[in-house]
Amino acid sequence: MTTRQNLNELLNVLEEIRSSKYPDVPKELIEQIAISQYDNQDDRNKARTETMKTLADYINKLG
Amino acid sequence: MLHFDRMTLIDFGPYKGKQVVDFSDKSGVSIFWGNNGRGKTTLLNAFRFALFGVIQRRNGVLKNISEMSNDEAKLEGRYGFTVILDMTNDEDKYKLTRQIKQRPGLLAPGSDEDYEKVLFLAKNGSILSPEDRDHELNMIMPEQVARFFLFDAELLQEYEELLETNTSDGEQIKNAIEKILGVPVLQNGVIDIEDCLSNYEKQKSRAARADDKTVQLGQEMENLTANIEEHQNIVREKQAELGELIRKKQILEGRMADTDKLRNWIIQRNEAQKTLSKNEEDLEQVQADIREHMKNAWRGMLLSTVRDLREKIEHEESVLEAKKQKRNVADRFIIEMKKAITDRICPICGQEVSGSIIEHLRAKIEESTNEFSGLSEEERQRLYNLQGQMSSIRQLSVDVRDEKQEIIYLENRKEELQISIGEQKQLIGELADNIKRYGEASEEADILSISKDHSEVEQNIRDLRRGIEAENKKLAELKTSKEHVAATIDKMAGGTDYRLASKKYELCDHVFRIFEESKTRYREKLKQNVEKDATALFVNLTGDKDYVGLKINDNYGLEIIHRSGRTVPGRSSGYEHIVALSLIGALHKNAPLRGPIIMDSPFGRLDPTHKANIVRTLPDMAEQAMLLAYIGEIDDQVARKELGNHLIHEFRLERITSMHTEIR
């Protein structure tokens, strides 16, 4: 997989919003979703499945 | 970051045999010098072919790709061609091989069907599966963003579309810009997270319905959610339809450009046919008019003869009439004289007339009787005949017009029409030949219907956009209602299940909001960065102190700012290139996806100063840049001086024969 050093700018923006307004959301969750989307830009289904699974894994831990 | 290390060409276009170009792993600029026809554009196409399997020509994508086979190689029995591209992306080494190969068993392949396409991608020495290969290639260099890496002067000119709103070309470029900048990562994230959110919302509604205190509100919430989903689906459908229509519009615009010449010929031929039919009708009418006029033309033509004859008769008649008149006068005089002789008194003064005067009167009577003898019998008959002839001649002249002028006019008109008919027939013949030669199998009706279809598609796009706007408005209203209901439920519901469902929903909602808000902020930040970096490049490129920067619009179009603060209207073609290059350079600085820039004769109408400025700025635009230029397009001394240590290598495209170029 491509290293994502160039994705930093985008991740920084996500982190700015998360840390200032939604600190209850784990930083890793946001990064993981962003990276799934970035790595699968050519495959929308895979990006969607990975995003939904990542989210479900985190959220269902609440229960 | 993507870096091209080496390219191997085998019988590709004019590059006969196996030729290897080593780009070196260093950062900097390589220049390929080659005169017209030596294969600069083909070299640019070699990259396109290797990466995307397409060859771009001035009039669109090359349909029969096998045409790129080297002609001399074919004469030597070698058909097909290969391009191998060695690349490094971050830490990974790639070897991309794309080949058009003669099918086994064929001696002299002709069309593309006689060839097979072969594609391999090795990553760090291992050949990838087709799925992984396609994925890796899409990640390394998606075709949608190729315009920022491989371009020529014509492609640079297209960026002015970004200054217009709602043009399909502009929209396409804007999407490509957002793609290279990584905006879809957030856009798609928002869509997918919103779907998750919808699931957690349903769970929350169900939990509210199961709670005694909020049964009704839970039901209301479910209804609103269902309603919202319905409208969201409509929006999605409309957006998909819109995307389809935009693609259709682009295809139609491409076809319009491709068939522009052909369509004009067909329109011209149809016009010529209309003119021909009209001319033929007019000619028929003119010929009928000429026939009608000719019926009475003999009378008109006799008019001058009749006039001469009439004058002659009138003259003779007047002479005879005068003679007759004189006799009458003389007769009255003789009667008066005779009375004076008889009465011996003058009838005028009443005085007595003397004998000498009587003698004188008798002499005068004698003289007058002899001198004014009047008309002879023959002359009287002649006068009578002349009067009869005059009457007939008058009858002949009644209602007779001189048709000559009218007939001359009609004959001239007939000649004009005959010439025009000849010309139209010749034009129709020439146009029909052109249409037949270039139109190939195209159906004329299809060609003519393109612009009509284009207008219809444009109208449908406008309608759809209005429809989406209305749906979004409705959605916003429903979401507000839902928020009110949700807030009420939160206050009233107390069950554990509801609290848990609500907590899950809230977390998902926060994730959604992070992506949604980041999308807008990232876009704004990118715009600011692109504007700042493009301005820095532009100021270096232009060297004009009056132009202090560039201002970005919502489409990523860049306007030049004068030091007075005004935007500069109607910039030149040269400045269009400078702005486009500034934008490309800025995108490379800000995009998650970075790679080499390969430019084919990008200087267009730029003057030597601006060319030198561009050369000097190349190392700032991309880590690896390749410039394909004809000798004299830029001064080699200037290029070397401006690039200094950034110039890695100069290659020359040398002519061996008209169909064979060697890269040295």
Image (spheres, rainbow, N blue to C red):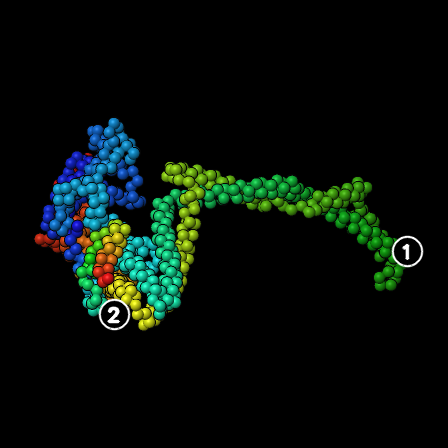
- Tell me the residue that label 2 is attached to: B564
Q: Mark 2, chain letter?
A: B
Judging from the image, what secondary structure is the residue with disc 2 in? loop
Q: Nearer the viewer, residue B94 or B370?
A: B94
Residue at mark 1 shares a chain with residue at mark 2: yes
The image position of residue B52, as x and y in percent, is 24, 44
Q: Amino acid at mark 1?
A: Thr
Helix, strand or loop status at disc 1: helix
Residue B313, image x, y percentages: 71, 44
Query: Above or below — where is A44 with respect to B127?
Result: below
Please identify the residue farthest to the front as the structure is shown.
B212
For disc 1, the marked residue is B342
Pick the residue in front: B338 or B454. Answer: B454
Q: Residue at x 13, y 51 (%)?
A: B90
Q: Nearer the viewer, residue B485 or B159?
A: B485
State the residue at coordinates (61%, 40%). Answer: B291
CA distance for labels 1 and 2: 129 Å
Query: Foreground mark, 1 or 2?
Result: 2
Residue occupying the point 15% across, 53% down: A3
Instruction: Using the rendered view, name the quadrant where residue A29 is placed.
Output: bottom left
Mark 1 touches mark 2? (CB < 8 Å): no
Q: Can see residue B388? A: yes
